């Protein structure tokens, strides 16, 4: 795949900033992958919250809902509750912050939201 074709498949979110960040987002539900796409953000100080805004603004995306603390509460039909919650991974490593507005989005990172059943 050429770079031009790669850019055509990319979800673009232009916040008219000076920083460009390209990353991959995968959302793994209870039984299957709900979403996977390369995303390009053009913003000042992009965060994981901006990645979510890009997905929510896209007609082909999934709906990602946050609570007032910036925590993921629901993706598609799967809602965090007493049986499980959404876990955030960056480059396959769990993050300790849950507020997506406090998690910087850096170039060439892989962002993953995984449904995590409580035992």
Image (cartoon, grey):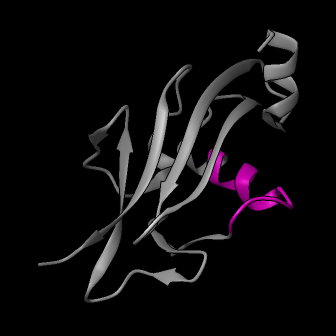
**93 relative to 118, above or below:** above
Range covered by the magenta-colored residues: 51-62
Q: Position of residue 76 (x, y in %)?
A: 61, 75
Which residue is at the front of the view, 31 or 107? 31
Q: Which residue lies most toward the left here? A: 119
Q: Position of residue 95 (x, y in %)?
A: 29, 45
Please identify the quadrant where the N terminus is shown: top right
**3 relative to 43, above or below:** above
Residue 90 shown in magenta: no
Which residue is at the front of the view, 85 or 100? 85
**1 relative to 16, above or below:** above
Residue 59, image quadrant: bottom right
In the rendered view, does 90 fall on the left or right side of 118? right
Q: Which residue lies most toward the top here? A: 2
Q: Position of residue 80 (x, y in %)?
A: 39, 80
Residue at image point 37% right, 31% down: 91
């Amino acid at each position: 795949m050429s770079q031009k074709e790669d850019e055509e498949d990319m979800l673009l979110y232009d916040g008219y900033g000076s920083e460009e960040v390209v990353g991959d987002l995968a959302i793994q539900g209870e039984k299957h992958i709900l979403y996977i796409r390369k995303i390009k953000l053009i913003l000042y100080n992009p965060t994981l919250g901006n990645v979510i805004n890009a997905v929510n603004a896209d007609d082909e995306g999934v709906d990602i809902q946050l609570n007032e603390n910036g925590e993921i509460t629901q993706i598609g039909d799967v809602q965090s509750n007493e049986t499980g919650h959404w876990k955030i991974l960056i480059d396959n490593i769990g993050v300790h912050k849950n507020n997506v507005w406090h998690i910087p989005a850096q170039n060439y990172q892989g962002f993953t939201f995984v449904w995590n059943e409580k035992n």
